[in-house]
Amino acid sequence: MHIPAYAHDAIRAAALPSMPTSRQVGGLDCCLCDKPFGKDLAAIPLGPTPTSGLFGCRPCLTRSVTRARRARDAARTHDAERARAESAAWMPVRERHLARLDSLRQAAEAVAGLARGTEVEALRIAWLLVSLESAYTWVPDAPEPPASVDRTDSEMKDEAFRLDLAMIAAREVVAERLAYHLLNEAQPEESEMCEEFECPEECSGRHDSTHIDCGPDAVFEDLADHDITVEQPEPEPLAPRLAALLGRTEAEERHSPLPDLEEQAPLVLAHFGMPGWPGAVASAMERLALLDRSGAPGVLADLAAVEASLLDAPDRLGADALDWISHQALLGWRAS
């Protein structure tokens, strides 16, 4: 007789006697009904081995297996109903938390958008960030799902991550907006520059900045003013083409399209990171925009790309373009 595992465990746990008789231990009597085994009542082993332990008769074991099956099915039904009830209670909790995260993410993106613009005054932007941070602080921890619910659901973690990214972006944009607001507020009026900047008649004379490039070293020098010393990183090596242009051999100087570049490099190229270089590029771009570039290399047609290359990697412009720029003295020197 086959006894399923669930029934076998149930029989051994609930139906077997705690103090079996010697006849039951000897396999002479059924351990369930205590009837003697014989020709019409076979002994069925219950373990621990087929020849030792306790034995039961077929009628008793049949009834016990039926009861165990019914108990198992009832437990399954109960567990399924409990799982459905827990899931029904969990889903609204989950959806409310996801909606809260999504709403706050949208608020963070809206604050960042307003901070990038100029229509909302800086003080109002500051208050928006404060209220956004307050709302972020009030976000509760993610609720824990019940044990019967699948825990591989990653949507809450993903939504929380997207919110964190939106908060970081909003803080960055607001910080930049407020920093430039303070700097611009501290700048004196320069009415004499209005004509050069072609300002409208109602200009107050104060010309705000939206981007200031201090180069890679200024922050370390500024911190040193506050007695804070941070070791500066090693400068990046020159690109191979510029390294060749800056070589000292006579042959390279004779064939270089920029023969005076070696002497002018500290002033002109300034190894692409010195504080004076962005200003030199900005001045050069103003003059370049006014020149007739019909005979210039094609790479100089896109002024935005030219400016980006001069700031980041001038060698990307190529020798012909650098030679043309040098002959126009756009960077304060002229190639011979």
Image (spheres, rainbow, N blue to C red):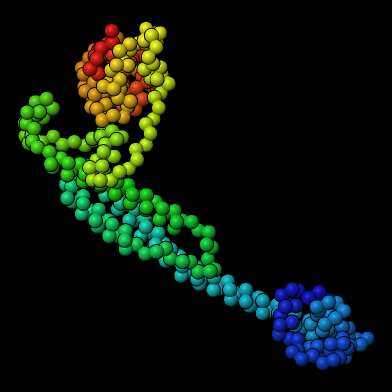
Residue 148 at x, y percent in the picture:
54, 68
Side of 40 relative to 167 (left or right): right
Number of dots carrying numbers: 0
Which residue is depicted at the point 43% across and 21% down?
240
Q: Position of residue 120 (x, y in %)?
A: 18, 46
Residue 22 point in image, percent of width and height: 85, 91
Identify which residue, 301 or 171, lies in the foreground: 171
Relative to 317, 176 lies left or right: left
Residue pictured at 84% horizontal, 89% vertical: 24
Rendered-image quadrant of the N terminus: bottom right
Q: Quadrant of residue 119?
A: top left
- Residue 75's quadrant in the figure? bottom right
Q: Position of residue 182 (x, y in %)?
A: 17, 44
Asked whether residue 83 is in view, the answer is yes
Quarter the C terminus occupies: top left
Q: Is residue 17 left or right of residue 158?
A: right
Q: Is residue 110 above or below residue 36?
A: above
Residue drawn at the location 87% of the way across and 79% of the way down: 51
Is residue 267 depicted above or below 77 in this figure? Answer: above
Residue at position x 26%, y 43% in the image: 223
Closer-to-camera residue (141/99): 141
Q: Tell me if 175 is positioned left or right of 317 in this view.
A: left
The picture quadrant where one finds residue 203 is top left
- Judged from this view, the residue extending furthest toward the right is 39
Question: Is residue 66 among what the camera can see?
Answer: no
